[in-house]
Image (cartoon, rainbow, N blue to C red):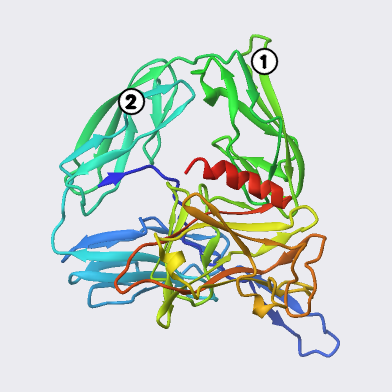
Amino acid sequence: MTYKNILQKGAFAALMTAGLVMTVSCNDDDVSPVLEERVLVKEINLEVTPELPLLIGTDTLIKYTVGPDEAFNKEVVWKSTVPDVATVDAKGRITAVKAGSTVISAKPAVGYSATSTINVKVVNEIIHITDINLTNEDLEVFVTSTLPLTWQTSPADPTYPGLIWKSLTPDKATVNEKGEVKGIAEGKARIQVTATDDKHFTKEFEIKVKPIIYIESMEFVKEADKLALGETYTPQMNVTPIDATLSYIVWESSKPDVVEIDEKGRFVAKAYGNAVITALADYGDGKPVKATMSVNVSEGLMNDQFTVENIWQPFGNFTHREFEWMENDGVLRIFPGEDKTYKAVRICRNGGFGFNVTNYPILAFKMKFPENVFEASTSIEWYLDIWGGSGITVAGKYGEDTDKGKNAMTVVDCGEYKVFYADFTKKFLGKNQQYMPTSLTKYDTVELQFWKIWYEANETGSIYVDWIKTFESEQELKDLIKNESGKQ
């Protein structure tokens, strides 16, 4: 098994509201109420991994904290969903009974809250880690830079895959709990790793820490660019020398409420508007090196490319046989669900979308079907359905005034892919023959549907979605299709 360092988000939080107790005097002359505010528990933090393996016959006491400190009743109620597999007592001690899985929950004794949980797997034997090997191509890091370590354990599937990292030379490099090594000073750093099972296999590795290579000049490839709301953008820069230490760059946004810069130097579009991004390398010699870029977060721009995040999901309760965001490939992979003797696909955008067809009147989907499936699907139907939202009066299927919107989107080839697109200046939305509003309009639901997709018996093969975007014009879309077709 190969383990890669990724940022994990894990918090067991229970949300509760504060309670008020009111007392009123029986004396008619004294009508002023006395309010006693009782602070309830707002969170329970379980100091354990979300997945907890236990050996049959063993037990463990879960450490936890309750907040806030001023909560008037901090009692926690524990429960096991399958007590035949593992039990839990009033103090949070879990006892493994027999092989299987259960969920241990903890919630406040008073109030209405979400529940914090642990997934417990009871096993017959512990598979211990006997070796750990790093899989990085180069065990080198620059001063101020970070090297995420990747590794393999032997055996590949241990019971407790967690590792503890420690720097034996913190003056040269530090390491965090994720195995990310940060260079501190030139030299050789020694990093120790220890298995978290009861045998605690330990191994040391040497990391070369290289000195900073100073930036002599830098400039953004683009002096200005447009971002979609919510988009995460990695800027491209020309830097001299080419192997300069980029981790020394300090980033600044003139309007962080519009464009924020994350810890990786990526731009995150937070709100519509304009911001100027500055990259600065100051070595204290009175000759700082900097570059600037103007960024516009544009109303109506969609640029969903599936490389950083995915906000498209199956629509409602419709079930696809398979639905996967392939982050490394930057695509959605879908094996269609059932549609009587055919197959079907229904996907929608989480959170809807704010259209501004004055700026971006074209919405397009780039998709690839299994070989011959699209051509064999002689009865295939596709629809674009847009609806829901505050004050929405124009809604429904794109081109719905003609044949209920069936195949109203234009389809063109793009190498192995096909691009389906809607031009909101040419066709109506819904049955009432109305064009989409020309100002910013937030719709709750944007859904793409495919029906009557024909697969031969036992035929396999997924449908891939490469990107979903809006465009300023049909010509801009055609230019992109021409460019990408040549790359297929």
Residue at position x 55%, y 14% from top? Answer: 214
Residue at position x 46%, y 65% from top? Answer: 374
- Judge by depth and name the residue closer to the eye, 466 or 265: 466
- Judge by depth and name the residue closer to the eye, 71 or 305: 305
Distance between mark 1 and mark 2 Cα atoms: 30 Å
Q: Which mark is residue 79?
A: none
Q: Which image quarter: residue 167? A: top left
Left or right of 152 on screen, residue 208:
right
Residue 487 locus on image (x, y percent): 49, 40
Q: Residues within 10 Å of mark 2 (few under 14, many from 20)?
A: some
Q: Which image quarter: residue 71? A: bottom right
Residue 252 locus on image (x, y percent): 68, 32
Left or right of 303 on screen, residue 374:
left
Left or right of 55 on screen, residue 248:
right
Q: Which image quarter: residue 236? A: top right
- Judge by depth and name the residue closer to the eye, 488 or 121: 488
What's under tag 2, amino acid-wise?
Leu
Q: Are marks 1 and 2 in contact (CB under 8 Å)?
A: no
Left or right of 145 on screen, residue 122:
left
The number of discs equals: 2
Residue 434 locus on image (x, y percent): 80, 73
Residue receiving disc 1: 288
Tag 1 secondary structure: loop
Earlier along the polypeptide chain: callout 1 or callout 2? Answer: 2
Q: Residues within 10 Å of mark 1 (few under 14, many from 20)?
A: few
Query: Does residue 209 lie above or below 348 as drawn?
Result: above
What's under tag 1, amino acid-wise?
Pro
Residue receiving disc 2: 139
Residue at position x 70%, y 57% from top? Answer: 362
